[in-house]
Image: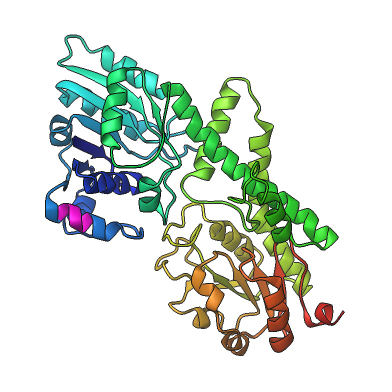
Amino acid sequence: MKVSVIGTGYVGLVTGTCLASLGHHVICADSCQEKIDGLIQGEIPFWEHGLEKLVEDGLSKGTLTFTTDLALAIRSSDLILLCVGTPSLYNGEANLSSLWSVISQVEKYSEGRKFLVVKSTVPIGIGDEIEYKLQQKEHAPYVIDVISNPEFLREGSGIHDFFNPDRIIIGSHSPESRNVMETLYDGIMAPLFYCQRKEAEMIKYASNSFLAMKISYINMIASLCEQVETDVTIVAEGMGSDSRIGSAFLQAGLGYGGSCFPKDLSAFWNQALDRGEEFPLLAATQWINQQQPIKVVEKIQNNLGYSLKGIKIALLGLTFKPMTDDIREAPSLSLSRLLLKEGADIQAYDPFVRDYPIKEVQLFPDLYEAVANCDVVVFVTEWPSFRHILWDEVAKQMKGNLLIDGRNIFPLNDMKNIVDIYGFIYDSIGRPLISRSSYED
């Protein structure tokens, strides 16, 4: 198929590249000339496992091209994938300015039969509004079917997720649209779930909100676990072994972040409020998530027993999750601001981050340089490499001995031995504190 992908952000670039690898002829279009020039040279603007090789293959085979010529992309394609960003406005609603700008271009340059696939996360009913707008043009030289096909790609594993989805949601109103989507995804072994456009749009918001709710729920449980001195990881494992619950997203810690969950929950909540629904579960989910960095600051204060003014703290991991360079809405941002407000000095290390928006945070290229002379070390992101940390080197470099594990990276039994050897105080989320005195008790 001849496919155009409008928008070369994370979703657009991963989706377009993967479709090209399936044999479709894909044009990826974006208004940013610098980004397109880089992509033509095989330069990927963000890190995603395996993406650089797939882009290189698509370019060499001629199945993948990049352009800033939106008119060319629209005219040359039978199927148009809309992958533009819908970021949050100041009030939490989705900003649809880029979406409507592209729709105007689709209306202007389309001819003949086209299929417009909305992959961007949009408010419920926008697909119908797009169709209505396109149908209003008098003597239109086109017939355009609008399809809702929300994406469920996870940063860091987007290519795997594209080729191995649990299901593919297709919101369409015509048999022709279904046939086209079956052709588009031919070769991917996953069930196609057909529904109406509004239902597909709702599924995206409801799915992300539910996953975020699981994270906040286990963080709520973690708070009680600390009070009764139990291990939330054991509680979560027992819960998750029930197939009705499942273990995914039941990891207590600093909370969720990234470009999806915070934005989608705010937009979904606003849509509910506009229709007279309060959605208290979403309100609680967001509130609990906002409390997690605050609780880590309180842990530091409680363990030190004095003000954080002048205290040197190392943050290990800055991205919102491992295996990505994305720091959008990352818990590290809130945590850094809170610590700086308390007067702390912050040193930081992340294997993928070379630039950080909070300039008071001093970045180091090496983990052990970042912890040097620090009173406290906080594990913020669960990077796999942290599991192989050299504790003797950490103990040698640190001035203090307080470790805060904001992601429960390390098993408690392992840390009992580490604490016994090096004299650390180890505090985590929803688990008993470990120190030499508690270990001896």
- Camera-nearest residue between 93 and 320: 320
Q: Examine the image and state in which quarter residue 342 appears.
A: bottom right
Q: Examine the image and state in which quarter residue 129 appears.
A: top left
Residue at position x 24%, y 32% in the image = 80
Q: Is residue 101 left or right of residue 241?
A: left
Quadrant housing the N terminus: top left
Res 114 seen here: yes
Q: Is residue 332 left or right of residue 376?
A: left
Q: Position of residue 316 (x, y in %)?
A: 54, 71
Q: Position of residue 91 (x, y in %)?
A: 53, 35
Q: Is residue 173 above or below residue 367?
A: above
Colour scheme in use: rainbow
Q: Position of residue 74 (x, y in %)?
A: 18, 31
- Camera-nearest residue between 42 and 315: 42
Q: Is residue 61 above or below residue 119?
A: below
Q: Examine the image and state in which quarter residue 400 appears.
A: bottom right
Q: What range is drawn magenta here? A: 55-59
Q: Is residue 310 left or right of residue 166?
A: right
- Camera-nearest residue between 355 and 48: 48
Quadrant housing the C terminus: bottom right
Would you say residue 335 sits in the magenta stretch? no
Which residue reaches farthest right?
A: 441
Q: Is residue 179 above or below residue 120?
A: above
Res 92 seen here: no
Q: Is residue 266 above or below residue 297?
A: above
Characterize the magenta stretch by its predominant secondary structure.
helix
Residue at position x 18%, y 29% in the image = 78
Residue at position x 50%, y 41% in the image = 263
Residue at position x 30%, y 57% in the image = 51
